[in-house]
Amino acid sequence: MATLNQELVARFDDGRTIHREQAGRAIAGVMAALPAAPGAILLNCQCSYRFYVALLACLAAGRQVVLLPNALPAVAARYRDQYGSVIDDADDVLRLRYGSSDVTLLESQGAAWHGQLDPAGAVLLYTSGSTGEPKKVVKTVAGLMAEVSDLQSLFLGAPPRLLAATVPHYHLYGLLFRILLPFQSGYPFLASTIRSPAELAELDSYVLVSSPAFLRRLTEQEPLGGAALVFSSGGALLPDEELLVQQVFGAPCFEIYGSSETGGIGYRRARAGQHLWTLPGTEVRAGADGRLWLWSRYCAETGWVERDDLIELHADGSFRVLGRADDIVKIEEKRISLGHLASLIRATSPAIRTARLLVYDEPMRKRLAAVVVVDAAVPESQFARIEQVAKAELQDQVERMFIPRKWKVVHEAVLDAMGKLSRSTMLELMHE
């Protein structure tokens, strides 16, 4: 195993490397330009290293940073109209734009920045929109760094390994694991995003920050050496998917449970049961109706906060997530969890990446509709067969009224960068 340079911050696909002194000068250069820019700073950087520089510069200067909900050009254009100051990396160069000003951000020729982030700084980010319109969430620097410190203590040891990620840096999971954890721990990171399992074969001694959407694509993948640790967040892995991850990587895989609003809540090691353990900065309890109550030092809210997840607590302090309270629907006087039904549909074919359900009205009754997202390699001629098999297998597992009446099978291109299907996209698909 090659030993990484302790001063290494980031590595690019072409072999270029960024070391601590150079990164510090880049951060100092951005900080010098910030006083002239009004208000919150919207970050629209595609490269994770340039995002790292812009983010740390803004937070070190005590500024509020705004992150985009996704990387779509139309979305970026809409949000630019809402915020007066923007840092982007068009043409692979950091630029600060405000009013009629367009400033190229160069490395400082003076002292490099190697300081601390200002506790007064904050990050405004948006949820993925998987349950509705994206919501604003404000995270304080204090809360973010408290979580990062706990993650480092819990999971990372010496020597430092390269952090490689399949998830974007503009959602909270990527922000924490891909950007702030390297800053806190000294682990270097890969500046580009991993798009396919084949890219991992070129890496040696790395930590993978990923999601179920990516890990499900490992089917028929040859074993990949080099991974020391795998993280997954954004949904639960099925037991056969956990086995596949173990066979491909041969490394421990930890699922992180949480949300944009709460930050991390708990974790579990794959292949070690379904029970979750709370992160060091959190406590959970179950309400009388089974809802999760959370206390967390990672959140802006103080005290105990009620969440929509339903949980089951165990005597040893662990807990299990049963679904969402708002996920329980009543069809013909009987109740079912849409999340549970979606997992049953997913299990009917290895080609299915995810499934989402919605309720619609017919005269005198409610019905269910299903959107089933399959691997891009599946030909459309197989869509009808996938639907037929799912319907047939559901007949042995749920009552008749819970088998969706409407189906839409689509390719995985409809998923966002975290492998989620937004509610707005789902509604559009069902009305095509």
Image (cartoon, rainbow, N blue to C red):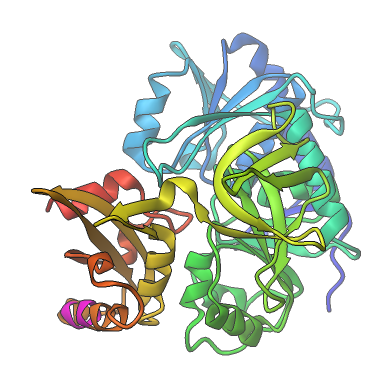
Residue at x 88%, y 54% (from the top left corner): 153
Q: Position of residue 364 (x, y in %)?
A: 11, 48
Which image quadrant for residue 300?
Answer: top right
216 vs 123, left or right, is left
426 vs 76, left or right, is left
Name the one closer to the observer, 233 or 358: 358
Q: Position of residue 39 (x, y in %)?
A: 57, 12
The verdict on residue 386 being magenta is yes
**Residue lying farthest to the left in this orientation:** 363
Residue at x 54%, y 79% (from the top left corner): 241
Location of residue 287 with respect to 210 vertically, above or below: above
Residue at x 48%, y 55% (from the top left corner): 418
393 vs 369, left or right, is right
Q: Main secondary structure of the magenta part?
A: helix
Q: Magenta part of the protein: which range?
A: 384-388
Name the one closer to the observer, 421 or 277: 277
Name the one closer to the observer, 148 or 60: 148
Location of residue 127 with respect to 233 vertically, above or below: above
Name the one closer to the observer, 194 or 418: 418
Q: Position of residue 277 (x, y in %)?
A: 76, 59
Residue 35 visible from this viewpoint = yes
